Amino acid sequence: MPSSLFKMNSFATWVVRSLSLLNLTTQHMSQAPLQSVSITSHSTSFLDHVTPIDGFFGQTFLRENIPFIDIPDSNIQEVYYYRWSALQRHLRYTVPGTGYIITEFMQPVGYAQALNTIDAAAGHQIDEARWFRSQIYDDDYILAYTRGPANSTQYTHWILDAMFRRSQVNGDTKYTTDHLTDMARLWGYWDYTYDTEVGLYYFTPNWDAQEFSLPGYIVAPSGGDLQYNGPNTYRPNVNAYMVANSRAISLVATQAGYPKTASKFSNIADQLEHSICKHLWDPDQNFFVDVIRPNNPELTKVQGREEVGLFPFRFGIGLDAKYANLSVQQLFEPQGFFATYGPTTLEQRNKYYAGTKPGGACCYWNGQSWPFSTSHVLKSLATIYRNGSSSLSAEQYVQYLGIYATTQHKNGVPYVAESHYPSQEEWSADGSNHSEHYQHSTNNDDVITGLLGIIPRSDDLLEVSPIVPQNWTYFAIENLHYHGHLLTILYDQDGSRYEVGPGLTIYCDGSKIFNCNSTSAQANLPPSQTSVGPAPINIAGNPIGIGAYPLANATFTFFTDSPWKAIDGYLFYDSIPDNRWTNYQSPSTNDTLQITFARPRNISSVTLALFSDVARGGGIDVPARLEIYGSSGSLANLSGGWLLPNDRNTFSFEEVETQFVGVKMFRKPGVWVGLCELEVWVQPDPTPRYYAVDALLTGASVTTDRDSDATKNCAVVGSLGRGSVVAFSGIESLGGNATITLSYLNAGRTAAVEVTVNQVSKGNLNLKGTGGNYNSVAMTVELAGGRNFISLLGGTGNIRYETLDVKML
């Protein structure tokens, strides 16, 4: 077998899995996480990395991306591995420059915002994904909110707090300091909900992601929209989010060297925390409670404890014993929040509490057990325990983590949906092809930071402070990505389990650096290693839909499937929810799926996420063989004996220029073939030219114009109108002023288009009439450090765009 079959890509690590080659210029590989440095070197292998993930799809991703654990509680451990597979399902690729977002639902929902983002649980999602070895997912997702198209005012959130805490895991302070201005801007979006007289923020519970909650029942006991939405309310959780967001800005400002900004936001946080304790703490109920705003000049407190009253503690608010110790006791009261599948969202002694719910609406937060809230409560419990301000024990913390794990089951296997009955072994909101593997909470972040006690810090001191029962004789977490290192932490009481000696042992990048007899430790780490190269981009992604570029078509498609679903950025291998192309029931022995780019591209690999359900009793399997071809002809011709089912398969070849990629798949006898996603990863173009046809288009489309020579196929963007948005993303900068030059044609009168940079309007570009010729117009804008978004808003049907050139001044 030739030794030079594959030229290693400089932008990603690829791990050789198998070779079964009919074309000697092609190599078949499984794909490692997307980053520019090897994430498998300097690791350890004390634990089993096969059995815990053996039943999941996408095992290559899991094996290369997650920390492995070993604990005495099999229930918590089993759910831990499941939740990584659940999170993997929600990583959606959009367009180059924007990259990945994390979805709440696996299938799109009508009320989602741009690219199917919903900000309500973004803080939870960032917390969970920060432990992936590849940092591209959180990098991209955060950017969508701070500078990109995602809406950060749909629901209340703690995104800014999550951004800062994420930097404490990966050690990359530059990412957050580059976003300091963006963080302050996102914080300011909520000014309209701030009551200057009371010193608190208010919002309706529904848009706090808390429909059918206690304030709504109090003001509208008979039902209706007001009961569903609730009145404007000063809420403990909303104000705690804003305290946390303010403190995050203050801490980032300190790191960036802006003491005045740091002081300003620190003072804001302190004043807001004071108002929370003054107005929302009820000494009669010994709990943080809601205060309804309308018709309530005396700020009379709501009678009734809600789970949201426990949220402030996780953000360091109210940790004095007079608050924390009395509040936490309600979690263990049978008439409080304690339940078999709890905690409940409303205390059970309240007259509006309901352990069941009517049909129709999914979410009733007057009693149902809700993973979103449970995640907050677990973090509050860990914070209270470590603060020592209550009688809470490690056993009680693990009890609640165990209840949460038990709740996350269906038909005897790990599973998470929207809400669960508090006292029945059944999910109360679990719509088919909708609620499966619902990503609206944390679990693994609680196992890592709570149970196993990895306490993220901004410095290079590793702090381990587990919350484990006294009778645990071992626990371990292996190959944890932290500050650019791979850490393995082993506790073995007598040294017999891991055979590295008794006590707590820490490995950093494969080398032993610490040992002690305690379960807790502080150890110095080498300096953070956060420098990475540019992330590769997937030029095959099409998040917009059928008819947009890249185009997808096939010679045969089963009627419930779609070629577009093979490039829509969603990647999961479930039967339901479904998201795939198949040729099920095709009369042919082979069928072809083809994608067409908006312009010719240079490519050197194709990644196929192949679907197989034969082990589930279905009729789809990996191909017997396949051929990959482009504009110049055959690129690969491979047998299927080595193809990975329900996983990524990457095929690499000599770089070629092509307008399209076709994959001809030959089926095995008696079965058909299917593809969950086709990806084409390339190195981002280092030149400062950005093609309009590559932009994220809203109310515009790709067309051809023979008068344009910007691309080899004369592709431009046209069909503009008043609501059009042409969003150029991934514009790299070190920060500073830049000249942007737009190449355009305007066959009509002068028209103005608005220019926004990172969500902020920068004025208009006046596009003068050019007749049938292409001309250019320029303006100076300020770019931030890192990736920027430049959008053109509006236009007319007479206008066409070629390129946007960016020159730093």
Image (cartoon, rainbow, N blue to C red):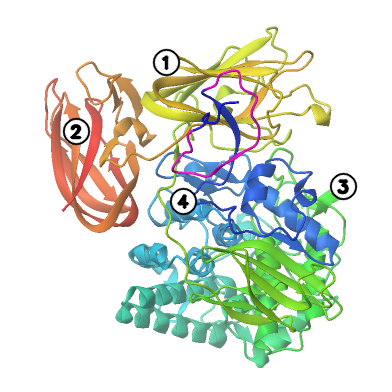
Q: Quadrant of residue 470?
A: bottom right
Q: Nearer the viewer, residue 488 or 266?
A: 488
Q: Quadrant of residue 424?
A: bottom right
> In the picture provided, is 629 more to the left or to the right than 107?
left
Magenta stretch, residue numbers: 7-24
Magenta segment main secondary structure: loop
x and y, in percent, of residue 111 in the image = 55, 45
Mark 3 Cα shell of 10 Å, populated few (<14), some (14-19), many (≥20): few
x and y, in percent, of residue 180 in the image = 36, 67
**Element under label 2?**
strand
Which residue is tagged 4? 140
Q: Which mark is residue 696?
A: none
Can residue 195 be seen in the rendering of this structure? Answer: no
Contact flag, marks 1 and 2 (Cβ < 8 Å):
no
Which residue is tagged 3? 411
Q: Earlier in the sequence, mark 3 or mark 4?
A: 4
**Element under label 3?**
loop
Which residue is tagged 2? 743
Which residue is tagged 1? 631
The CA distance from mark 4 to mark 1 is 32 Å
**Element under label 4?**
helix
Q: Amino acid at mark 4?
A: Asp
Q: Residue at x 67, y 41 (%)?
A: 58
Q: Would you say residue 702 sits in the magenta stretch?
A: no
Q: Nearer the viewer, residue 760 or 683?
A: 683
x and y, in percent, of residue 113 in the image = 49, 46
The CA distance from mark 1 to mark 2 is 28 Å
Contact flag, marks 4 and 1 (Cβ < 8 Å):
no
